[in-house]
Amino acid sequence: MSTEAYRDVLAERLPTQTVKLIASPAEYEELLPQARVITGFEIDAATVENATNLELFACTFAGTDHLPLDAFAANDVDVTNASGVHGPNASEQVLAYVLSFARGLDRGWQQSQAGTWSHYHTDELYGSTVTVVGMGAIGGAILDRLAPFGVETIGVRNSPSKGGNADEVVGIEEVPEILPRTDYLILACPLTEETEHLVDETALARMPPDSVLVNIARGEVVDTDALLAALRTNELRGAALDVTDPEPLSDGHPLWSHDNCLITPHNAGYTPRYWDRMADIIADNIDRLDTDERLRNLAK
């Protein structure tokens, strides 16, 4: 996405502020001490130290673990993220995956490409049980969009006592118990020690053979070898993967050979409205910097 477009959107949202796109190292050195707010996807600790007027770094990623958080804390600089920016587009992509499998559109597409008119059986999403692992901005948006379809929803989060917009909310440790009644398992969680290979051979064996796995989280949340084995032996109806392990998926990788595995190149997060939503967050927070109001999307 164009950084020039981001600059233009920010300038439009912030008519009383000076918005600059750094174009050269010399300009960077000149403007850095003046900057009250910096936005981008990364910054190093030395830059934070030298940005003596900096109050806020607005990260354009949802995750901030790659940033020098200690340097921000030491220099009293707040950090915000892009949480919520991806909600509408990522949740729409998940619904597209789920409905495609429910209505057999994968087979319909194949037959259409082959010029074949042949009736086949399909299913309904209505009445299914959908489990969403991760109830952050994206997981919450997915659950919101599932509500009108008449499905039973199970939300999985680290602190189930917080509740949420699912019919049932459970902790991550309860995933093995809910898998046998899950028709669609949607992964929208961060990659942590707890979620790495959450979906492994044992988990896949607990899922019904007509169930579907959807992963828009991180590739490592799924054990690729175990998934391949399940797809080969028809232990799953299918899988939709926007993320893979490894990523990018190499030419000739076995996952490409399975007709019941839909792979997209990590583009569920893409939206033409990305910069508009980021600018909304930053404009709101610039107003909040002069008050005691908590910043929106403040990273923990």
Image (tube, helix red, strand yellow):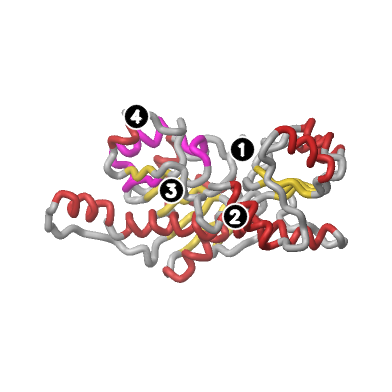
Identity, as a three-letter code, of the amino acid under mark 2 = Trp
Q: Amino acid at mark 4?
A: Asp
Q: Report which quarter residue 118 is drawn in.
A: bottom left
Residue stretch rendered in magenta on the structure: 218-240
Q: Which residue is mark 2?
A: 275
| Three-letter code, disc 3 | Val
Residue 80 colored magenta? no
Task: Locate residue 192 relative to residue 75 in the image: left or right.
Answer: left
Cα separation, mark 1 vs mark 3, equals 18 Å
Front in this rendered view, residue 36 or 23: 23
CB under 8 Å between discs 3 and 2: no
Instruction: Determine the CA span between mark 2 and mark 4.
Output: 32 Å
Q: Which mark is residue 192?
A: 1
Marked residue nearer the N-terminal end (1 or 3): 1
Q: CA distance from mark 1 to mark 4?
A: 28 Å
Secondary structure, mark 1, is: loop
Question: Reading the chain from its start, which is encountered first: label 4 or label 3?
Answer: 3
Image location (x, y in percent) of residue 284: 73, 62
> Which residue is disc 4 drawn over?
251
Residue 31 drawn at (x, y percent): 79, 41
Q: Earlier in the sequence, mark 2 or mark 1?
A: 1
The residue positioned 40% from the left and 61% from the top of the image is: 128
Verify CB contact (< 8 Å) between mark 4 and mark 3. Answer: no
